Image (cartoon, rainbow, N blue to C red):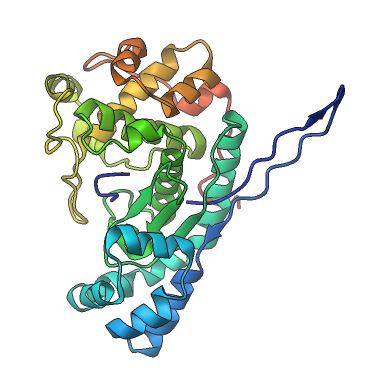
C-alpha cells in the first residue's frame, strides 16, 4: 500500500522439472515464513526499560542486530533509535496497546500461509520475497513492492488502525495479502514516482482484488459503508481526475484515526470488473498484476461509473478460503 503504506511473508515456489522425455514429480512449495523475531526483541527491551528505552538502546540493541527487513525499513522510512524513542514519548499508547496484537501472530501466520498457497497455485510465476513484522516509529503501517526487499509490517501502526477492520486478526491477514500482491506487480508502473490517479488506483486496487481472491477479503474494507449509494457520484469524479498527477483527493489522505484513499476502492472495482469480464481467469489475474498500459486495461475492463459488481471473486475459480476462526 503506497499512501498510508499505511503494507508479508516469504516462501518459495518450486516448479516441476522436465528432463529429457520424462516428467519429474512437481515439488511442493515450501511453507511461507513470517519473520517476527524483531517484535520479540523489541518488547524484551521495552519491558526491561519499563516502557521507556532510550534512543541508543533502541539503535544498538533493537535495530542494529535486526533482520534485513527491519534494516530496509530503517533505510527507506527513517526508522532509527531516535525516531522510535521520540514516538514512544509522544504516543506511548501505541506501543503498550500493540502487545495485544502479538497474540494473533501465530494464527495470522497460519492463515496467510494458506492465502499464499492459493496465490502460488493460481499464479505459479509469483515472485517470492521475505515478509517481516517489526516495531517502528508509529508509521508506516505496511510497505511492499516488486523491488526484491519484500514486505514490512509495522506491528504498532497496523494494530492502531482499527478503522481498517475492528478484528485484529482479520486486519493483519488481509493487509498482508494486499501487500504481498504488490510484490508481484510490474516494477515499471509500481516504481513510477509521479503516477496518475488511474495508475495508482490500478496498483492499489489490483492488490485489493488479489487480497480478496487469495485471503477472502480486501485489505482495506472501510469503504463499504461510506460508498454505498454514492458509487456513481464517486466514480464520475474519478473519471474527471484519472489523468491527474495530483493525488490528494484519492490517495495519501488517511491517518491512523481517519480513513481516506478512495482510489483503492475505485481501483478494486476496475480490477474486479476486468476479472469478471475475462473468459480466462488465470490470464486475467496475471494481467491485473502485470498492468503496463493503464488506459488499455481500463478500456478492456468493462468498468463504468456506478456499475454493479456481483458475486465473490473467489467463487469464480471455486477457491475455498480457510475459515476466519478455527472450527469448534
Q: Quadrant of residue 81?
A: bottom left
Residue located 12% across and 34% down the image = 246
Decide if residue 52 is in sight here.
no
**Of 35 and 111, which appears nearest the observer?**
35
Residue 223 coordinates in the image, percent (x, y) = 25, 37
Report whether 75 appears left or right of 317. left
Residue located 40% across and 83% down the image = 45
**Of 308 and 235, which appears nearest the observer?**
235
Residue located 51% across and 10% down the image = 279
Decide if residue 173 is in sight here.
yes
Measured along the vertical axis of the image, is residue 174 above or below residue 63?
above
Report whether 25 appears left or right of 298. right
Residue located 31% across and 21% down the image = 294
Report whether 150 appears left or right of 199. right
Q: Quadrant of residue 22?
A: top right
Residue 257 coordinates in the image, percent (x, y) = 19, 55
Number of numbered discs on residues: 0
**Of 197 and 223, which appears nearest the observer?**
197
Quadrant where the N terminus sits is: top left
**Of 272 and 186, which appears nearest the observer?**
186
Amino acid at each position: 500500500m503506497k499512501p498510508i503504506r499505511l503494507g508479508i511473508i516469504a516462501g518459495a515456489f518450486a516448479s516441476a522439472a522436465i528432463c529429457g522425455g520424462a516428467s519429474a514429480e512437481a515439488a511442493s512449495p515450501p511453507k511461507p515464513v513470517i519473520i517476527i523475531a524483531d517484535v520479540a526483541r523489541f518488547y524484551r527491551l521495552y519491558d526491561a526499560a519499563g516502557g521507556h528505552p532510550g534512543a541508543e538502546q533502541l539503535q544498538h540493541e533493537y535495530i542494529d542486530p535486526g533482520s534485513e527487513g527491519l534494516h530496509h525499513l530503517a533505510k527507506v522510512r527513517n526508522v532509527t533509535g531516535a525516531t522510535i524513542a521520540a514516538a514512544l514519548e509522544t504516543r506511548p499508547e501505541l506501543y503498550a496497546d500493540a502487545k495485544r496484537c502479538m497474540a494473533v501472530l501465530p494464527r495470522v501466520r497460519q492463515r496467510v500461509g494458506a492465502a499464499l498457497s492459493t496465490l502460488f497455485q493460481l499464479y505459479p510465476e509469483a515472485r517470492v520475497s521475505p515478509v517481516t513484522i517489526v516495531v517502528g516509529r508509529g508509521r508506516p503501517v505496511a510497505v511492499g513492492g516488486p523491488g526484491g526487499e519484500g514486505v514490512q509490517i509495522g506491528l504498532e501502526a497496523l494494530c492502531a488502525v482499527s478503522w481498517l477492520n475492528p478484528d485484529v486478526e482479520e486486519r493483519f491477514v488481509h493487509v498482508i495479502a494486499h501487500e504481498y500482491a504488490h510484490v508481484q506487480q510490474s516494477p515499471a508502473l509500481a516504481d513510477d514516482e509521479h503516477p496518475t490517479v488511474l495508475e495508482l488506483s490500478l496498483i492499489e486496487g489490483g492488490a485489493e482484488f488479489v487480497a480478496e481472491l487469495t485471503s477472502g477479503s480486501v485489505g482495506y474494507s472501510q469503504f463499504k459503508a461510506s460508498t454505498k449509494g454514492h458509487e456513481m457520484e464517486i466514480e464520475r469524479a474519478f473519471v474527471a481526475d484519472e489523468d491527474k498527477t495530483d493525488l490528494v483527493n484519492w490517495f495519501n489522505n488517511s491517518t491512523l484515526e481517519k480513513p481516506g484513499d478512495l482510489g483503492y476502492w475505485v481501483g478494486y472495482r476496475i480490477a474486479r470488473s476486468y476479472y469478471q469480464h475475462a473468459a480466462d481467469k488465470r490470464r486475467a489475474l496475471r494481467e491485473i498484476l502485470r498492468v503496463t498500459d493503464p488506459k488499455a486495461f481500463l478500456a478492456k475492463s468493462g468498468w463504468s461509473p456506478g456499475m454493479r459488481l456481483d458475486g465473490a471473486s473467489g467463487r469464480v475459480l471455486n477457491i475455498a478460503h480457510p475459515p476466519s476462526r478455527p472450527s469448534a
